[in-house]
Image (tube, helix red, strand yellow):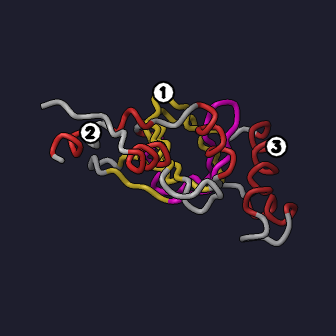
């Protein structure tokens, strides 16, 4: 049994395939957005996101501590889980990267309608009302450009567990 348990130590063999990664990104609408404050502590909040052109896009108003922190240090991470989707629990992706802060109208013009489709009917009853909710003078759009990904597919490890095919660990 000891050797079998060692096989659970290296879960890198249970990565999400590219297809399952894309499925998760498309089905989920929330992520944990994580940045570092000036004291070096990691902080995170759950945010709605838009996946677009290989980046993860979120929004906040410019007076938020996360925006101030990202102006100082653009390094951040995003964690996306399958919880709440029809994929079931146990699938995750963590993207590490740097954030670009957008304040230009061209970005707002495509981003607000895309985000409004995700957040409507909460907190606004229609897509148009959601766009109005988002379109405020202090709002910025944060683009996390992934530099690295950590992917995990819990279905793969569960299948191996049930089949008894967990790789033996090293002694």
State which tag comes first along the sequence, 3 or 1. 3
Residue depicted at 25% across the width and 41% down the height = 9
Q: Residue reaching furthest top?
A: 147
Image quadrant where residue 8 sits: top left
Residue 2 can be seen in this image? yes
For disc 3, the marked residue is 109
For disc 2, the marked residue is 7
Alpha-carbon span between mark 3 and mark 1: 26 Å
Q: Where is residue 119 in the image (x, y as percent from the top left)?
A: 73, 62
Horizontally, residue 59 falls left or right of residue 126, namely: left
Q: Give the range drawn in magenta.
A: 46-70
Q: Where is residue 138 in the image (x, y as percent from the top left)?
A: 65, 54
Q: Give the SS element for disc 2.
A: loop
71 in magenta: no
For disc 1, the marked residue is 147
Where the C terminus falls, by quadrant? top left
Horizontally, residue 112 falls left or right of residue 94, namely: right
Residue depicted at 57% across the width and 34% down the height = 100
Residue depicted at 80% across the width and 41% down the height = 110
State which tag comes first along the sequence, 1 or 2. 2
Q: Position of residue 71 (x, y in %)?
A: 47, 40
Most foreground residue, 133 or 78: 78
> Crowding near pointer 3: few (<14 within 10 Å), some, many (20+)?
few
Q: Which of marks 3 and 1 is in front?
A: 1
Q: Position of residue 156 (x, y in %)?
A: 47, 43
């Amino acid at each position: 049994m000891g050797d079998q348990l060692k096989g659970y130590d290296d879960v890198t063999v249970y990565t999400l395939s590219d297809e399952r990664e894309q499925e998760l990104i498309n089905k989920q609408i929330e992520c944990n957005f994580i940045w570092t404050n000036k004291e070096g502590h990691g902080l995170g909040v759950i945010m709605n996101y838009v996946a677009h052109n290989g980046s993860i896009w979120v929004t906040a108003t410019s007076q938020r501590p996360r925006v101030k922190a990202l102006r100082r240090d653009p390094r951040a991470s995003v964690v996306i889980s399958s919880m709440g989707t029809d994929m079931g629990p146990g699938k995750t992706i963590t993207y590490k990267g740097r954030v670009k802060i957008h304040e230009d109208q061209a970005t707002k013009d495509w981003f607000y309608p895309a985000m409004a489709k995700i957040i409507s009917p909460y907190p606004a009853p229609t897509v148009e009302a959601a766009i109005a909710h988002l379109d405020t003078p202090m709002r910025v759009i944060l683009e996390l450009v992934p530099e690295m990904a950590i992917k995990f597919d819990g279905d793969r490890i569960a299948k191996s567990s049930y089949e008894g095919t967990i790789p033996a660990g090293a002694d």
